[in-house]
Image (cartoon, rainbow, N blue to C red):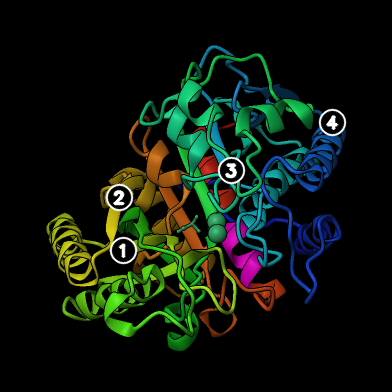
Amino acid sequence: MAAPGENLRINSDRLWDSIMEMAKIGPGIAGGNNRQTVTDEDGEGRHLFKRWCDVAGLEMGVDEMGTMFARREGTDPSLPPVYVGSHLDTQPTGGKYDGVLGVLGGLEVVRSLNDLGIKTKHPIVVTNWTNEEGARFAPAMMASGVFAGVLDQADVYEHVDKDGKKFGEELERIGWKGTEKVGARQIHAFFELHIEQGPILEDEGIDIGVVTHGQGLKWLQVTLTGKEAHTGSTPMPKRRNAGLGMARVIELVHEIAMDYQPDAVGAVGHMEVYPNSRNIIAGRTVFTIDIRSPEKEVLDAMDGRIREGIDTICEALDIQYKIEQVGHFDPVTFDKGCVKAIRDAAERLGYTHRNIVSGAGHDACWISRVAPTAMVMCPCVDGLSHNEAEEISKEWASAGADVLFHAVVETAVIVE
Ligand code: HGY
Ligand code: MN
Ligand code: MN
């Protein structure tokens, strides 16, 4: 982009102060956040975001999945807006920046345009997607998945958390179930700023990740059923130990992921043991396998080998199993034009940059199915995320938001 936007920069202090203000809502126990989707804390964070949007003169729309769309009018209101945003919900032991940087970075773009009195042809819409994390209610990227038409709204309304509460009822309870039909909005382009959540940018001393692809993901929820029995008086050969089955499957997932290095990953982070008593052999275990790869063929191969392995393990232990796929998206290739806008912005602003594949899933992965989409990443300390110790520098946040600013404004077209 030549011209008026050459040296546009966001207000670094205001962005940082807003992130710290949002971090006060739903505090964790170790300096991070626990602002899980459609909890009261999530509702409080939404109200704060709405107040800021009101001050910035944005018109708020909310759809039936609770996603928030704050619109800054363009000189041609009939044009499809440029969307910018991410998510405000966090993991139970989440950091202050995962998702929040993208929503408040988008708000900062609008705030800076207001300060500078700059108008754009296309409207700009700052977005907070509901339930990106999928921690309380699977799957991850739930609202953006419904928006993209890959998840069924009535179905996800019925998804329950570990206490048996339903997503749809909780969304209604916190007062953020909107009336807009999900997915009705036309999107000219979508940009998402996010922390890398991995070590590459920091290790290489690079300011900006130009995200060309997102790796694919599968979440397989496994239920193993054996038989509760006394841990003392039941002879080893007579045991049907669902806990042992889970342990062997966890090891299997790790071994299979290691067979496809350097890119594939696999782990089990969610585990439930019943009845979870010290002197009862676990009769039932429920756990979720998380496998990912940038290559669809590898993801499918891992899936197949894991299913075979579970069958063999359960046969040997005389236990039953049920496998439900509770999350899935194929590897994503982001829009070349949007990716170029990000790379050109980093170049123009003098930030070091490199292409990168996103290891984590993001709302952008689903929205890329319905609109030209790309992501900007900034480094995070030790590549750590989904941990309350998640940390970034103010400089990294500002560099990412400056690049976002340029990419959004270039796509929305500045009007003299
Ligand atoms: O699971 C993910 O990759 C994202 O953080 N929800
Ligand atoms: Mn995120
Ligand atoms: Mn996350």
Does 54 sit left or right of 162 as displayed? right
Q: Which residue is mark 3?
A: 131
Above-or-below relation of 188 to 278: above
Whether residue 259 is visible to the viewer of this picture, yes or no, is yes
Q: Amino acid at mark 1?
A: Ile
Residue plotted at (64% across, 46% down):
106
**Would you name the residue on which mark 1 appears?**
291
The Cα atoms of the two marked residues, 4 and 3, are separated by 23 Å
Residue at horizontal 48%, vertical 85%?
232
* Residue 247: x %, y % from top left: 36, 77
Q: CA distance from mark 2 to mark 1?
A: 18 Å
Residue at image coords 32%, 71%: 245
Q: Which residue is mark 4?
A: 54
Asked if one can make out residue 334 in the rendered structure from this viewpoint, the answer is no
- The label nearer to you, 2 versus 4, is 2
N-terminal-most mark, 3 or 1: 3
Q: Amino acid at mark 2?
A: Lys
Q: Is residue 223 above or below residue 166?
A: below
- Secondary structure beneath dot 1 equals strand
Q: Is residue 311 left or right of residue 367?
A: left
| Secondary structure under the numbered disc 2 in the rendered image | strand
Residue 18 position within the rendered picture, expressed as x and y whole percent measured from the top left: 81, 56
Q: What type is the residue that disc 3 sits on?
A: Asn
Disc 4 residue type (three-letter)? Asp
Drawn side of residue 377 relative to residue 92, left or right:
left
